[in-house]
């Protein structure tokens, strides 16, 4: 879970808190860098809490992993899941939904082309620039078809959605690293949905900061940061 910097700053206008004190620290005495550091610390705590909850849910629903690390279920757990599986019932599918199916699954072609093109792009460019490549397997995750309570159509939908969203996230990180390498400068206008690296970019119009820090941005990419 990522929190926007703008949201964190807005919520801190009544006084920020020191890590070791309950007394509010006036905003003027706390730099933006300190706020970002504390925000990242909170984000790490939230991520850890989500991971702990996911582990509890996995134990509760008997999720195991095979030797390859893929999720799986024991036979009795799968039988219980299949008791909740709905029949296909294609006759009950609304006509507008059926008519949009070619549009939905037709997106598989451009998504596949995007997948291949950005993979070739980073293989050539990132290797030439000496920066760490994005690990595709960390973004394109397809495992929901293993759930016993999904019928074949639902499984196909989940595979398609997992692939599509994964490819887009994978491509986004590749383009984000490219931007950090070539143009780590913020826009003058507010940008919605900016990637995680954007908030560390140099301010718009800060020529000295850009010239002084460009090499450091590239070194961080070489270290995989």
Image (spheres, rainbow, N blue to C red):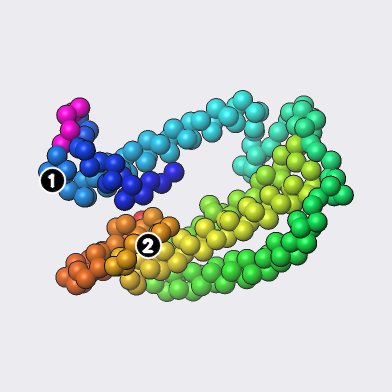
On residue 191, the disc is 2
The vertical placement of 129 against 191, above or below, is below
Q: Which residue is drawn at 39% across and 72% down?
A: 129
Q: Which of marks 1 and 2 is nearer the N terminus?
A: 1
Is residue 184 among the parts visible in the rendering? Answer: no
Is residue 173 among the parts visible in the rendering? Answer: yes
The residue closer to the viewer here, 34 or 72, is 34
Instruction: Decide if residue 191 is on the left or right side of residue 174.
Output: left
The residue closer to the viewer here, 79 or 1, is 1
Instruction: Decide if residue 55 is on the left or right side of residue 11.
Output: right
Residue that lies at the very extreme toward the right in this rendered image? 91
The residue closer to the viewer here, 76 or 186, is 186
Give the x, y percent position of residue 52.
Answer: 48, 31
* Residue labelled with disc 1: 28
Instruction: Decide if residue 191 is on the left or right side of residue 68.
Output: left
Q: Which residue is drawn at 16% across and 70% down?
A: 208
The residue closer to the viewer here, 64 or 141, is 141
Give the x, y percent position of residue 207.
Answer: 19, 72
Q: Is residue 23 on the magenta stretch?
A: yes
Residue that lies at the very extreme toward the left in this rendered image? 29
The vertical placement of 191 against 27, above or below, is below
């Amino acid at each position: 879970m990522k929190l926007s910097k703008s949201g964190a700053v807005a919520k801190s206008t009544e006084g920020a808190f020191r890590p070791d004190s309950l007394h509010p620290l006036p905003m003027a005495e706390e730099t933006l860098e300190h706020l970002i550091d504390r925000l990242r610390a909170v984000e790490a705590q939230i991520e850890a809490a989500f991971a702990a909850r996911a582990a509890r849910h996995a134990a509760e629903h008997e999720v195991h992993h095979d030797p390859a690390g893929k999720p799986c279920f024991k036979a009795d757990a799968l039988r219980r899941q299949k008791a909740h599986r709905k029949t296909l019932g294609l006759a009950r599918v609304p006509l507008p939904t059926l008519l949009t199916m070619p549009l939905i699954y037709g997106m598989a072609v451009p998504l596949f082309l995007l997948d291949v093109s950005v993979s070739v792009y980073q293989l050539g460019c990132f290797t030439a620039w000496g920066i760490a490549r994005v690990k595709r397997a960390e973004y394109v995750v397809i495992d929901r078809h293993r759930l016993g309570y999904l019928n074949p159509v639902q499984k196909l939908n989940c595979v398609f959605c997992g692939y599509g969203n994964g490819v887009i996230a994978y491509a986004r990180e590749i383009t984000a690293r490219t931007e950090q390498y070539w143009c780590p400068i913020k826009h003058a206008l507010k940008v919605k949905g900016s990637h995680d690296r954007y908030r560390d970019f140099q301010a718009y119009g800060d020529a000295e900061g850009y010239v002084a820090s460009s090499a450091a941005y590239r070194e961080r990419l070489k270290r995989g940061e």
